[in-house]
Amino acid sequence: MKNKQETGLDFIVDKLTNSIENVVTGDSFATEVSVLTNSDLKLVTKTNGWVFNWRDELKEPTRDVYKLTIVNNSSIIQGLICLEVKPDHVYLHLIESAPFNRGKKKMYNGVCGNLVAFACKFSFQRGHDGNVSFLSKTVLIDHYEKTLGAFHFGGRIMVIETQTALRLINKYFPNQ
């Protein structure tokens, strides 16, 4: 695969919820995160409104791609995340809400927060104390500091450390 220059992530954390929350009714729905499979790829195409080429991410041998779904409704993908285990942390390469969870007419709040909390949980599972980093678009550095509790490490690098990771995990995965 050719090396792509990373431009920085530009996901919006609309709201930190306890799962994902229906925008209209306010009802919460329990979620689960599982590995994205090759058969899922037909659902997450640019033709279907997805921004990123998730097929390319799935081909990267050092990366893991996960999908967020509502419990008992695993056929509808709410969002995706691509992670790489580094020697001392987990690096977040990509994150994306489903097309129907973006913009003014989105169906659910909390998708990106849920996926970032999963990245923190994944980091603990890999022995990295919840430490997660990602490259941010410059204009969103302040947003990630305020919404996620990430800190600006320098340049466009954002880091989520142990205590912040625990807060996010306890919000989204309180019984796990």
Image: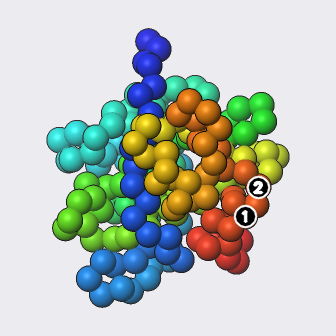
Q: Residue at x 73, y 51 (%)?
A: 161
> x and y percent of residue 82 in the render?
51, 41
Measured as percent of width and height from the top left, residue 33 is found at 54, 59
Which amino acid, by three-letter code, is at mark 1? Answer: Leu
Out of 53 and 172, give the one closest to the viewer: 172
Q: Quadrant of residue 22?
A: bottom left
Q: Which residue is mark 2?
A: 162
Q: Is residue 24 left or right of residue 161?
A: left
Q: Which mark is residue 52?
A: none
Residue 79 sits above or below residue 62 on the image: below
The mark total stands at: 2
Q: Nearer the viewer, residue 111 or 161?
A: 161
Which of the colour schemes (rainbow, by chain, secondary structure, one colour) is used? Answer: rainbow
Image position of 59 (left or right of 117)? left
- Residue under circle 1? 166
Q: Which amino acid, mark 2?
A: Thr
Residue 165 rendering spot, x and y as whole percentages: 69, 58
Eyeballing the image, is 58 above or below 15?
A: above
Residue 118 visible in rendering:
no
Q: Is residue 85 left or right of residue 39?
A: right
Q: Secondary structure at mark 1?
A: helix
Q: Which residue is drawn at the image coordinates 39% and 55% (left, top)?
A: 12
Q: Callout 2 environment at 10 Å: few (<14), some (14 to 19), or many (20+)?
A: some
In this picture, residue 40 sits left or right of residue 89: left
Q: Secondary structure at mark 2?
A: helix
| C-alpha gap between disc 1 and disc 2 | 6 Å
Q: Residues within 10 Å of mark 1 (few under 14, many from 20)?
A: many
* Viewer can see residue 162: yes
What's the residue at 65%, 44% (across, down)?
159
Q: Quadrant of residue 39?
A: top left
- Quadrant where the image shows the C terminus: bottom right
Residues marked 1 and 2 touching at CB (< 8 Å): yes
